[in-house]
Image (cartoon, coloured by chain):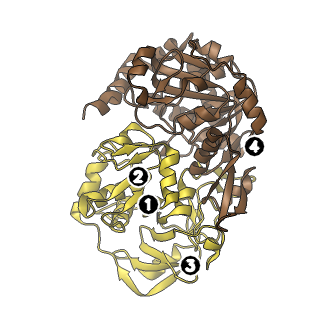
Chain colours: A yellow, B brown
Amino acid sequence: MTDNGSHSAAELLAVMSSRSLEDGQTVFAGVGIPLLAATLAQRIHAPGLTILFEGGVLGPFIVPGELPPSTNEQRCTRQANMVLSNTDVLLLLQRGYVDIGFMGGAQIDRYGNLNSSYIGDAENPKIRLPGTGGGNDIASLTRMIVSMIHEKRRFVEAVDFVTSTGYWHGGTSRSDSGLTTGGPYRVITDLAVLGFDEETRRMKVEALHDGVEPDQVQDATGFELMFDDEIGRTEPPTADELAVLREMDPDRVYIA
Amino acid sequence: MTKPYADLRRETETRDRSLREKVMSLEEAAALVDDGDHVALGGCTLSRTPMAMIWALIRARKKDLVVSRSITSTEGDLLYGSGASRHVMTSWFSQGIVWGVSRVMRHYTETGRAIFEEWSHMAMGVRYRAGAMGVPFIPVRSMLGSDLTGRIDGPKEMACPFTGDRLLLVPALNPDVALIHVQRCDAYGNAQMDGLPFMDADIAMAANRVILTTERIVSNSQIRRAPDRTRIPFITVDAVVEAPYGCAPHECYGVYEPFLPNLDAYAALIGRDAEAGVKEYLERYVYQPRDWVAYLDLLGMDNVIDAARRGRSVYND
């Protein structure tokens, strides 16, 4: 990952993702950037944020320096309010108790469909990836924030495989398929904050990070982006935000 | 995978469900598993993995098992590498995020020598739950629109007869055998778990045979003093095996955290050559040790102490 001198790309992703979270929300987070972002939001501006882990944890409090290696281990349960089965915690998504789900993926397309299953043809893949986990359920059942490094090989014209359905073929196709709730809400990259057009459901640039120009974002994208009429500018990560991230991940496992 | 209801009931009726002692060795329990069985694994990723029983099945040279689990980690690699299973049904399959994509999973699936049947995590859980409930399917609102449904045999879309909503019906799983590791149970199979419950209770209820491995066997009186803590009913259990550190090198809540030096060494080994690496690991850690204690000895006393110290830390807040 690139480093502009003051912070890494991963740190930028975590900071910008954390700012998309609001106090009082219930957030489904995986390990890595999502958990760092959610924890950062709790420490800085959203003390009433509730984190859910698909391992079956409701409302944990992550101990600095003890980030769990997955969301299914005892470290995830520190100071939690409840542990429950993976099935039941995932069913909370379906019941509607979760405001935001946090996702990553190997590839994303203009409608926010995500691939984390196969690179190449699924019948004869070049790379078999680890798969959906709870990603498909999160994408299907709640609003999702996707955090990804902005590269042409990741932002593609068509994903090799739809692991997690976004706005599917655009327009109303997502809800027509039976997915009547949720959908991609934001895509946060090391270049920009992106959203989706209300009608066409195509990906659009809402704000650029410090020092990034629109062409740079388009050049790093394998499909034609829409741009908001008035494109915003994000504030760079603050010293406070970076300090919290570095306290959480002192070995720089995720923020390097 | 979805058994006819009459068969499910008949198989359950013929099992001895009385309050009887079921304690046996890993080897004896392995004999309860047949080649080709659908074996469901309790726990999730690196947690409460029934490693001792998986280890015993590989040593017993089981073949063609269809293995299902919520999320699959290194135990899936070992099952592929040993040939005990060529078919893993799960939602996510790799050692763990910090170690990246599993080279062994990639090697066996990309060369077409093994199947990784991918379902969403919730769908896996709901399939076990349907099995536990004795119904053939449960409707869900996920996986719709995705390409996942086209690569697996089973789910069907329907319009809800009450509301007209489009739903995906996922078929029940009734595994032939469930392998579940717990912190404690009695000789009859009343199991009490601490920490994350995962899908274990549903898996036990859904399966046709249940093999419990446990950190320690406690008295039935102790179970009866806190029956609200019992998560797996003894009437579902067929075998109880005492296997201390039975998840190693994975973790068991409150008892030990993962044996990280072993997991790092494994990752390095398969990173050099996936197939040769997993076979070398199997030879050294699975086939050669005289018994489970000899295996723990290989992991090293210093690592056992370290993992246990970290494991107990949840009780020292």
Does A189 appear above or below B296? below
Residue beneath label 1, please? A98
From this viewpoint, is residue B252 visible?
Answer: no
Report which residue position mark 2 lands on: A52
Q: Quadrant of residue A22?
A: bottom left
Q: Which mark is residue B112?
A: 4
The x, y position of residue B238, in whole percent, is 62, 20
In contact (CB < 8 Å): disc 1 and disc 4: no
Q: Residues within 10 Å of mark 1 (few under 14, many from 20)?
A: many
Residue at mark 3 = A201
Numbered disc 4: secondary structure: loop
Chain ID of residue with mark 1: A
Q: Nearer the viewer, mark 2 or mark 4?
A: 2
Task: Kindly indicate whether the residue at mark 1 contacts the one at mark 2 (C-beta within 8 angstroms).
Answer: yes
Closer to the chain start, of discs 3 and 1, is 1
Q: Residue at x 54, y 39 (%)?
A: B199
